Amino acid sequence: MLMEQRRPVIMDRAHASDPCANCEARPLSVCAAVDDSDLDKLARVAVVQHYEPGQSFIEEGEKADHFFNMTGGTARLYKLLPDGRRQITGFSRAGNFLGLAVSDTYGFSAEAIDRVRVCRFARTKLYALLEDFPAMEKRLLATAGNELVAAQEQMLLLGRKTARERLASFLINISREDAPCAPPRTVLHLPMTRTDIADYLGLTIETVSRTFTRFKTERLVSLPSVSEIVILDRARLTRLAEGG
Amino acid sequence: MLMEQRRPVIMDRAHASDPCANCEARPLSVCAAVDDSDLDKLARVAVVQHYEPGQSFIEEGEKADHFFNMTGGTARLYKLLPDGRRQITGFSRAGNFLGLAVSDTYGFSAEAIDRVRVCRFARTKLYALLEDFPAMEKRLLATAGNELVAAQEQMLLLGRKTARERLASFLINISREDAPCAPPRTVLHLPMTRTDIADYLGLTIETVSRTFTRFKTERLVSLPSVSEIVILDRARLTRLAEGG
DNA sequence: AGTATGCCTTGACCTGCGTCAAAAAATTGT
DNA sequence: ACAATTTTTTGACGCAGGTCAAGGCATACT
């Protein structure tokens, strides 16, 4: 809500004749591979959509006719077991591309955590577009490779790290997530709930909470509010994350 | 060893003037995207390599100057923590493509389990080749998408499934691994050790062993030998794998 | 202000899986 | 065929993290 009040102009532009040219997420996303002069071709097949907190926009098992390019907000991506156990496979932010799955149905669900904005592409139209923009396909391949690396890192976390190491890894990763070369942040704002964090790290909400308080008493972090975290001792937290 | 004695002709062909044309792994791999008439271009940049059991051919952190296309045998892909804890992120077989990572260093290690054969490509040469064969790039993207789906499935397993569910999932997956539409196998030959299985499923070797014996007493499987497994009750095993 | 509704935290207890140790079985070398 | 070595299985026991239950603390609603 606040966000919208602060950025009315940009929101309007997103609906203007050349939305992509002014898209703040472009430099982060696959669209960066498309030349300025060709942006209209891209804009013609893209549909801007908004989702409210809690709203689901990809459902595991449903027919996968669309790709999504996140341009704002944060979404949780997850898989469920029949009895309700949930594993969050990742959090998706501006610049992330969703729906790469080759199968004809989605392999996961996606839900808005805060207010989410996406560009939606019909599967067939995007494939056609890729013919015109081979650079976009390259970028997509690079993205997929990066996600694969992240997934392997997460498997290491889920399979072999302790609760403390998992939470430390999570915080360090969040602190680095703006850009690979940008300096890591010290103050973190977590849009997700404790339950989300637990389901991402393969833990229970109680263990996440207890581990947070333990980090606090050990002066590794401070918690000005539930969703705000300040890293006090990055070196020690990093060592812990790596299993040292 | 046995395999070589049975297939000397094919091994010879792999060193002949047009090795790719007779490659048994071609229909399974990205090379299937290359036209017969263009196979010589592919063959010119590919180097056939063999690795003995236990031999490592990708080392995490090393400069990633090569891609590998597995054409025979089975390899373990894994990541290590400094103190030696290991997570196997996957087993790679004929047709699998390794090294997609976009970073300039490998994000995981790869080691031959049995005798492994690969086609090795210099990174730069393959990129050049992709310009000539856009279909190969498409196939690569599809492969990456499939691996991503598998990785998410594995995160669900590692984060939320019990030991019994993990082992059941493992066996069911192995039984289906020849082809997506082929009928699942009932008799499985596992080239990997119990330690490998444990490190893949995020368990200890003792738990894997105990769970195997429990499956045996429950008549879910029979174990004619350590590396041979017969699925006796696929329906029940499948239900177990899905958390039912 | 008061109260309702979700989170989040904390505590007490429990259990599935890990750890440690040793026997059994399979594999390898001579 | 036998000894040496490695891998797997089995048993006894312990603990990290799960489960259950009760309180605290926000933000929202009247």
Image (cartoon, coloured by chain):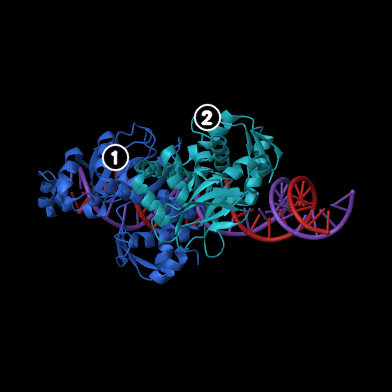
Chain colours: A blue, B cyan, C red, D purple
Any part of residue B54 in sight: yes
Residue ID for mark 1: A67
Q: Specify the quadrant of the image occupied by residue A101.
A: top left
Q: Residues within 10 Å of mark 1 (few under 14, many from 20)?
A: many
Residue toward you, A188 or C10: A188
State the residue lying farthest toward the front. Answer: B17
The residue where tag 2 is placed is B182
The answer to whether dots 2 and 1 both sit on one chain is no
Q: Residue at x 52, y 29 (%)?
A: B182
Residue B77 falls left or right of residue A192 = right
Q: Residue at x 64, y 49 (%)?
A: B193
In the rendered image, is residue A55 in sight? no
Q: Amino acid at mark 2?
A: Ala
Q: Position of residue D28 (x, y in %)?
A: 21, 47
The front one of B117 and B232 is B117
Q: Residue B33 appears at what percent x and percent y?
A: 41, 39
Could you tell whether A207 is left or right of D8 in the image? left
Residue B94 vs A25, above or below: the answer is above
- Which-is-in-front pick, marks 2 and 1? 2
In-image side of A112 versus A16 (left or right): right
State which chain disc 2 sits on: B
CA gap between label 2 and label 1 equals 29 Å
The residue tagged with tag 2: helix, strand or loop? Answer: loop
Residue B8 rendering spot, x and y as whole percentages? 65, 42
Image quadrant assignment for residue B152: top left
Say what amino acid the circle numbered 1 marks: Phe
Under tag 1, what secondary structure?
A: strand
Q: Residue at x 50, y 58 (%)?
A: A162
